Amino acid sequence: MMSNKAALKKFGSRTFSNISKGGTEVVATIYEPVADGDNCYCRIEIDGLGDDIIAEDMYGADSIQAIQLAIEKIRSTLYSHPDTVTWYGDRDLLIPRSVSHIYGFEFDMHLQKIIDAEIDAKTKSEVERYAGKRSV
């Protein structure tokens, strides 16, 4: 069910650059969650990737899940698009990835441990590199 855009309130937006199209703007917008029966949805719009605005309502069990799904939809759309999109000149658009809990809590915790270990290893490496530069 597509909502009446006039009734939606903008929640937030981010402007990117489409390097493949000479640096033209790509604007991703999330609208405030809207209750719809027992669920909620957030409208997302992405303008600047083609001739048409990409618009989709992302449904969740509640407003927080609708926001999470909206952010994930924007992230996946921008990263999977064939054009090169950047934010402040960087390909890292700083949109966090969300892992579906469909795989279960144990799997989520397993991934979290892997990520934490990688962060710890990278931090240790950077601290040692920095300390090595100071001792020279």
Image (spheres, helix red, strand yellow):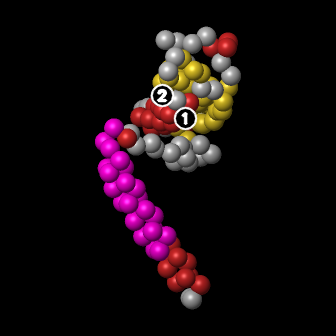
Magenta segment, prevailing SS (helix, strand or loop): helix
Residue holding disc 2 = 60
**Residue type for callout 2:** Gly
The image quadrant that residue 115 belongs to is: bottom left
**Left or right of residue 91: residue 99:** left
Residue 125 sits above or below residue 21 on the image: below
Residue 6 drawn at (x, y percent): 67, 12
Magenta residues (range): 102-125
Residue 93 drawn at (x, y percent): 54, 44
Question: At x 52% / y 84%, what residue is drawn?
Answer: 132
Question: At x 59% / y 84%, what residue is drawn?
Answer: 134
**Residue type for callout 1:** Ile
**Residue 50 seen in this snapshot:** no
Do the residues bearing badges 1 and 2 touch, measured as CB atoms within 8 Å?
A: yes
The image quadrant that residue 45 belongs to is: top right
Answer few, some or many: residues within 10 Å of disc 2's Cα (few below 14, many 20 plus, some between 14 and 19). many
Residue holding disc 1 = 64
Question: At x 48% / y 36%, what residue is drawn?
Answer: 72
